[in-house]
């Protein structure tokens, strides 16, 4: 396994857990593409990626991010993940699970696509 890929996904997860947008965005290239779900708009460039994640710390508390085994093929890697958190506004617990697919360039993520499903309070739910 490429240790750089593990470090990238672990740093991304630590940034999400801490609500640290700068740490989370540090894994991306300046011109990176982030796509939250297959049907969502692509955020292109580090400013757009920071813009997407800036409200996460406002809405999520007690965040825990775990990723699974990393599968790699050249500059691409993928992993499953689980992220749990509590909604600050309602106190409701959320359990999101899915997969992350990344392309890398020069040791950073140049494209990240997430595929996930979220459960809140024991029921399926779409994005806020």
Image (spheres, grey):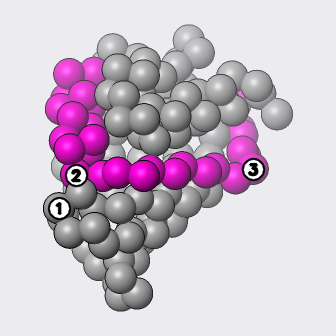
Q: Please state, as top left, top right, bottom left or bottom right, where the N terminus lies in the image.
A: top right
Image point 72% across, 45% down: which residue? 70
Q: Is residue 74 magenta?
A: yes
* Rendering coords of residue 126 (x, y %): 26, 73
| Residue at the disc numbered 3 | 69
| Residue at the disc numbered 1 | 89
Q: Nearer the viewer, mark 2 or mark 3?
A: 2
Q: Is residue 62 left or right of residue 105?
A: left
Q: Is residue 122 magenta?
A: no
* Label 2 to label 1: alpha-carbon separation: 7 Å
Residue found at the very far right of the displayed protein: 1
Which of these two is toward me, 124 or 99? 124
| Residue at the disc numbered 2 | 59
Q: Please state, as top left, top right, bottom left or bottom right, where the C terminus lies in the image.
A: bottom left
Image point 41% across, 59% down: which residue? 85
* Rendering coords of residue 97 (x, y %): 51, 65
Q: Quadrant of residue 56?
A: top left
Circle 1: element type: loop
Identify the magenta region: 46-75
């Amino acid at each position: 396994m490429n240790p750089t890929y593990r470090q990238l996904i672990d740093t991304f997860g630590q940034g999400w857990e801490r609500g640290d947008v700068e740490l989370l965005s540090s894994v991306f290239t300046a011109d990176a593409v982030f796509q939250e779900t297959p049907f969502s708009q692509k955020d292109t460039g580090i400013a757009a990626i920071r813009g997407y994640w800036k409200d996460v710390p406002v809405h999520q508390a007690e965040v825990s991010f775990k990723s699974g085994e990393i599968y790699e093929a050249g500059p691409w890697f993928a992993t499953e993940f689980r992220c749990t958190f509590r909604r600050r506004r309602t106190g409701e617990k959320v359990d999101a699970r899915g997969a992350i697919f990344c392309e890398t360039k020069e040791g950073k993520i140049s494209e990240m696509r997430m595929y996930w499903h979220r459960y809140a309070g024991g029921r399926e739910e779409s994005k806020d």
